[in-house]
Amino acid sequence: MKRFWIFLLSVGLIMAFGTTVFAADAKFNGEFYLQGWYNKNASLIDQDSTVGPSYRGSTAFYTQRLRMGMEFNVARGLKLVTRFDALERKWMAARRAAPAGGASPGYASTDSEAENIAFEVAYLQFALPVGMFAIGNIPASNNNFGSPYGENHGFSSGVMSYTYAKGAWYISAGYKRSTDGYVKTTSGTWPMGTPGTPIGAGTDNDSTTYSISTGYRWKGGAAGLHIGDVRSRTANVPHPGGSTNTVSRKTEIPYGSIWFQQKFGRFFIEDEFGICPFGDYVKWNEPFTPIYPYYKNIEADMAISNYFGINIDLSPVKLGFFFIYSRGDDPETMDKKEGGFRQVLDLDRDFNPCLILFNESYMQWMGPNGTGGATQQAAIIGNTTAANGINTYVQNVWLYQLNGDYKVTPKLNIGASFTYAYADKKPTNTGYPTAYGGKTYLSDEYGYEADLTLKYKIFDNLEYMVGAAYLWTGDYFKGIDDKVKLSNNYLLTHKLTLTF
């Protein structure tokens, strides 16, 4: 009997001291995908071309990723959210060590670790009578509202946010720290090919974004406004920024976007307009000695973008059209930057209008010229002249797309789209103006792309997709060399996705 009471007392003590643990209600969600790829000509260069990248021909492989999210509801209105990605890699591909100087862009740790397992999200969210707070490493979400053109749920950043909602109206304010450091040692090339050298310790070398947004919803529609300011001091070193061996500069870019959505019966229209009207894209701490004419302060100059879409619901058929304009940067104006801010602000990472053109997954796994091994930001299509290909950010573009899908059965859906895209501004091969040796691209045409997808729900949470894409390659990808012989490219892919 004595042992029984000792046991009962022990259980009571465990229950008493473990109250906070048992009170946490854990919820799990996740996604696992396995995708097969066959790409005919990722380099876009014909195999018989005598000039252009050496990597030619087809490639085939499988990729996979497990993403696990966990929410711990500790108390009413208080929860901890975390997430990790595991085994995000090609099947049986060699693991890559971290490159000299640190991990590659976009990864939280070394490439090898990121291919295995990487925690990317961990933040607290708590509700008070005055509003909702979220603090911690939160997935990037510059525009978690409005049209799909603004969506971004990419790599996480340090964030503090506050949201107050009342009825159909809300207001939100945020603070995001993208980078932090105090040492600047550069041996690369910036801004246009001039070698840098180690320049020692800096002060407060951070990149920070401040933002505020508001929105209102009504029956059948919604509208919102988002404004922010990016302040980067990642090269703000204590060195008089005029010599030829320093890169002492800083950046400050205000930006804004406004969006609108409305449903009229079977019709749904939406528009999102973004702008960087002014600001310092590059601001040297002190004027440079005019040895190199391209060392100039660079100001943002009315960099605008606009997305307009219309959809018609003719169930079981849906038809749609959208148009995108994003101003390009004029290479002839060295002291102004008129475009390219979609990438600077890390917008539209989740917006994939095609299976090839501007597609984030395609960029990541194909990499430059189909060789793979690059992050979404770094990988480009048509690596004819360094960074003047196109990447996942839909910028420097006029893009038009017709699309539609047909729900054959509750489990089977067929989708198709046809896209035409061309550059707003033709770049030069070096980034220099023509007066300083740059050569302008021969063409502004990215090309035409036709996509076809078939999706079938094996279970409510398990979907199988088969996709095909054909890209009629535009002459933009010849760069400056009319001797380059291009070839069209096609992609075949299939993907098994489990969500829970």
Image: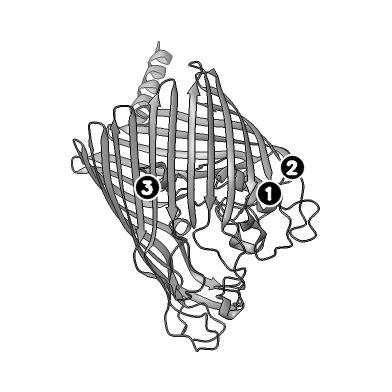
Q: CA distance from mark 2 to mark 3?
A: 35 Å
Q: CA distance from mark 3 to mark 1?
A: 29 Å
Give the image location of residue 195, x and y in percent: 62, 77
Can residue 255 be seen here? The reply is yes
The residue under label 1 is: 372
Instruction: Give the amino acid type for the residue marked by disc 2 in the picture.
Output: Thr
Q: How many marks?
A: 3
Of tags 2 and 3, the one toward the viewer is 2
Q: Which image quarter: residue 250? A: bottom left
Instruction: Give the amino acid type for the residue marked by disc 3 in the picture.
Output: Asn
Q: Are marks 1 and 2 in contact (CB under 8 Å)?
A: yes
Can residue 114 be seen here? The reply is no
Task: Identify the residue at horizontal 34%, vertical 60% (top origin).
Answer: 255
Element under disc 2: strand
- Taking the image as shown, residue 296 lies to the left or right of residue 163, namely right
The residue under label 2 is: 59
Q: Earlier in the sequence, mark 3 or mark 1?
A: 3
- Taking the image as shown, residue 275 lies to the left or right of residue 348, namely left
Q: CA distance from mark 1 to mark 2?
A: 10 Å
